[in-house]
Amino acid sequence: MQGILIYTAAGDSEGTMGGLVRQGEAGRIEKIIQRALQDAMWCGADPICIESPGQGTGNSNLAACHNCCLLPETSCEQGNRFLDRALLVGLPEDRTKGFFYRLLAQKKAP
């Protein structure tokens, strides 16, 4: 089972940062997630990033270079370890290996 928690600190109905709550409504959040996955298909450090046999602390990151690990969230309980972009979006030569292959194969978000 997986899940995504989107938390807003403000008590009003609109949330913070210009209506974050509204961005989570059905029809909007799906497009945001699909665009994020499409963006993850390429990294500025490719092909080195996507083809890496291991990098980071204890070589615990596969297709997730230093650029990919610069996440805005600093409270990852795994310390941004065990990341693998290819696990999500597949390899450039075989996207079918990615967990979200079917979602990415659908119509691209505008």
Image (tube, helix red, strand yellow):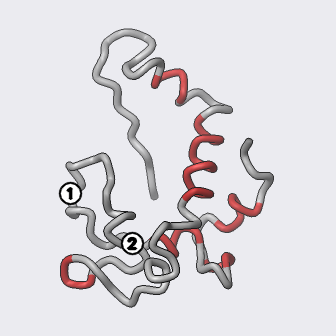
Residue that sits furthest to the front in the current view: 44
Which residue is under mark 1? 77
What secondary structure is found at the residue carrying circle 2? loop
Circle 1: residue type: Glu
Q: Nearer the viewer, residue 63 or 5?
A: 63
Camera-side residue: 76 or 64?
64
Q: Residue at x 31, y 12 (%)?
A: 11
For label 1, the SS is loop
Q: Which mark is residue 100?
A: none
Residue type at the position of mark 2:
Ala
Which quarter of the picture shows residue 32? top right
Residue 84 against residue 13 in the figure, above or below: below
Question: On the picture, is 74 further left or further right than 4?
Answer: left
- How far apart marks 1 and 2 lie (CA) works out to 17 Å
As drawn, the label of residue 64 is 2
* Residue 58 image position (x, y, % from top left): 19, 83
Q: Residue at x 24, y 54 (%)?
A: 76
Name the residue: 57% across, 47% down.
33
